[in-house]
Image: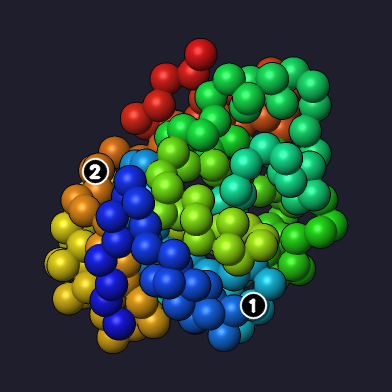
Amino acid sequence: MYVKLFEDNPNGRDIRKVVDILKDGGVIIYPTDTIYAMGCDINQVKAVQRVCHLKGVKPEKANFSIICQDLSNIAMYAKVSNEVFKLMKHNLPGPFTFILPATNRLPNVMMNRRKTIGIRVPDNFIVQAIVEELGNPLLTTSVKADDEVVEYMTDPELIHERYGNLVDLVIDGGYGKNVASTVVDCTGDEITIVRQGIGDLI
């Protein structure tokens, strides 16, 4: 399935159709404020396992992130110090992934050996509307081209050609960027940038 949504005003009926697919255990590809991503409802265990299979990783070794609607419910899924919360408040929504210690509210299938989780709040109305309608976070992982480790797919029509038979829905939200989010590790004594992407911390 393929649907086009406009980032400045996504159609509510289409958003509800997307969420119905997610609640039914579907896997979707969607735009963010950086690159196109693949994901599912974090509470749908078989869907999480499907994403792992598509990415070629074992669930316990995967370093997936989740997309939250805003900062208000992040504490349900990650442990956030006052210092880190202030940093996130200044930079989100935006092109960042904050790695934080995970809470036990995350499904077991999503817990890696380090017991950490990446948190994203993208500055993109399409994915924000999806998460709001869904009522809980999306599991999210990047969509990459097969032949290049660091090359991201940016054209939603080409993404559909590649993944259309493997996922339940591809959302066309316009061309994506080819630079990923900046990854900020907040699990140690010091906050460190482990991958400099499109976002610059303020």
**Dots 2 and 1: beta carbons under 8 Å?**
no
- Where residue 42 sits in the image (x, y, percent)? 64, 67
Q: Residue at x 79, y 22 (%)?
A: 82
Q: Residue at x 47, y 42 (%)?
A: 122
Alpha carbon of mark 2 to alpha carbon of mark 1: how far? 29 Å
Task: Residue lying at the far right in this picture: please name it.
Answer: 104
Label 2 sits on a secondary structure element that is loop
Count the marks: 2
- Where residue 177 sits in the image (x, y, percent)? 25, 43
- Where residue 119 sits in the image (x, y, percent)? 60, 44
Numbered mark located on residue 178 in the image: 2
Q: Which residue is label 1 attached to?
A: 44
Residue type at mark 2: give it: Asn
Image quadrant where one finds the N terminus? bottom left
Q: Is residue 155 above or below residue 177?
A: below
Mark 2 crowd level (few <14, some 14–19, many ≥20, 10 Å Cα)? some
Residue type at mark 1: give it: Gln
